[in-house]
């Protein structure tokens, strides 16, 4: 393992440790039962099969969104329309499930793939606007999320809403289209295997294929990529389309695995969660499931802690913010990094001299 990887691992671990320590201090200040609260936060999710199920259930959509953003951000394009892609993916999967009759086994697959297609269209809009008009991707992608939310609410209210239900929800999703639970006593569904497969394939795409290499080179230095003969516009667009596709299938998997009806009238926040996951995973899809598990575990523990010890779940939001601040801070442990590189260089020179 080279010094850069060691440094990244050390900085991430220390960032998490410092963030948790600060959170513990806040808990001690605000809680009447701080020890009980901290124990519940750390080991509460392991106390029952149901709680472990909660962690895995929350992890599944985070894997999709984390991989999607990792691929988009690898090209150094801060496209935040993945939130809208996830939302539209759930809507499209529901629409197809409710309005079509497909053979058993084919129905959920068709819903998920079409959801992915529409998800890619959402992230493509800011990307094309950037290419054609040099617009700010950050602004256009954020606005895209609002457009998607209002559009989804319109479709839900006028084309999918079940008038007999006591809330603004769609017609029931047929059982044949839903993703079945795989562990009794939990709602962990087949989407877990799809999510893990997406993470593995995302890694292969980014690190084992030519186009993945071109995306990463473009993200590191677009001018160098251009002068090296890489079609920067093409690889950038591919990364945005693929990222949106993964977000879209994530939304489809989530709605078919965890819901009986479509009821999303506001954004769910998975686009923002994806940035946290991607930051922890260093834009490597292979590390995304671990980062997703960590975040899901922390949130599940916070939820149980708030019930048992009356500590607000917002403590996790504080922890997340501190972790992100420390991980992205270039100067955090920078002196230690220089020492590691110098030590590694000396060792290499020493080995060369010995070989001579």
Image (spheres, rainbow, N blue to C red):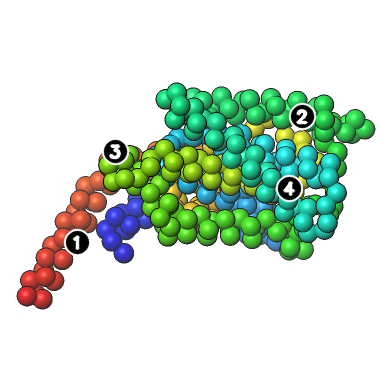
Q: Is mark 4 on a helix, strand or loop?
A: helix
| 92 on left or right of 71 | right
- The vertical placement of 269 against 345, above or below, is above
| Marks 1 and 3 in Cβ contact (< 8 Å) | no
Q: Are the residues at dot 2 and dot 1 in contact (C-beta closer than 8 Å)? A: no
Q: Earlier in the sequence, mark 2 or mark 4?
A: 4
Q: Residue at x 78, y 59 (%)?
A: 105
What residue does disc 3 label? 223
Residue at 27% in and 42% down: 227
- Between label 2 and label 1, give the one nearer the viewer: 2
Q: In this view, does 201 lie to the left or right of 17?
A: right
Work out how far the residue at label 4 is from the one at label 3, CA to CA, in angstroms. Answer: 40 Å
Residues at marks 4 and 1, CA–CA distance in whole angstroms: 51 Å
Q: Which of pointers 2 and 1 lies earlier in the amino acid sequence?
A: 2
Determine which residue is flagged by label 2.
Answer: 155
How many neighbours does mark 3 have within 10 angstroms: few (below 14), some (14-19), or many (20 or more)?
few
Residue 40 visible from this viewpoint: no
Of residues 336 and 79, the one nearer the viewer is 79
Taking the spot 53% from the left edge, 58% from the top edge, the residue there is 201
Residue hosting label 1: 344
Q: Dot 1, crowdedness within 10 Å: few (<14), some or many (≥20)?
A: some
Q: Assign a secondary structure to mark 3.
A: helix
């Amino acid at each position: 393992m080279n010094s850069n990887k060691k440094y990244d691992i050390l900085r991430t671990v220390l960032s998490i440790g410092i963030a948790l320590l600060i959170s513990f201090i806040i808990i001690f200040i605000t809680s009447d039962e701080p020890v009980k609260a901290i124990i519940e936060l750390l080991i509460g999710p392991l106390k029952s099969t149901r709680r472990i199920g909660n962690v895995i259930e929350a992890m599944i959509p985070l894997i999709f969104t984390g991989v999607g953003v990792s691929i988009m951000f690898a090209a150094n394009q801060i496209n935040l329309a993945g939130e809208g892609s996830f939302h539209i993916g759930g809507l499209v999967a529901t629409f197809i499930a409710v309005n079509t009759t497909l053979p058993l086994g084919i129905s959920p697959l068709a819903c998920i793939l079409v959801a992915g297609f529409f998800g890619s269209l959402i992230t493509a809009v800011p990307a094309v606007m950037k290419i054609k008009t040099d617009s700010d991707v950050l602004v256009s992608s954020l606005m895209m999320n609002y457009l998607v939310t209002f559009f989804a609410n319109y479709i839900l209210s006028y084309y999918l809403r079940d008038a007999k239900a006591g809330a603004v929800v769609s017609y029931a999703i047929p059982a044949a289209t839903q993703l079945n639970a795989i562990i009794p006593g939990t709602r962990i569904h087949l989407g877990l295997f799809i999510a893990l497969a997406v993470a593995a394939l995302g890694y292969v795409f980014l690190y084992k294929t030519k186009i993945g290499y071109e995306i990463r080179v473009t993200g590191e230095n677009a001018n160098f990529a251009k002068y090296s003969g890489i079609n920067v516009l093409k690889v950038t667009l591919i990364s945005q389309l693929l990222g949106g596709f993964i977000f879209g299938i994530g939304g489809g998997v989530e709605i078919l695995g965890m819901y009986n009806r479509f009821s999303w009238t506001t954004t769910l926040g998975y686009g923002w969660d994806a940035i946290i996951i991607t930051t922890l995973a260093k834009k490597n899809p292979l590390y995304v499931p671990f980062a997703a598990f960590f975040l899901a575990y922390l949130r599940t523990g916070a939820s149980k802690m708030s019930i048992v010890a009356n500590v607000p779940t917002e403590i996790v939001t504080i922890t997340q913010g501190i972790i992100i601040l420390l991980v992205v801070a270039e100067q955090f442990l920078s002196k230690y990094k220089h020492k590691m590189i110098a030590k590694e260089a000396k060792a290499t020179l020493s080995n060369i001299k010995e070989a001579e």
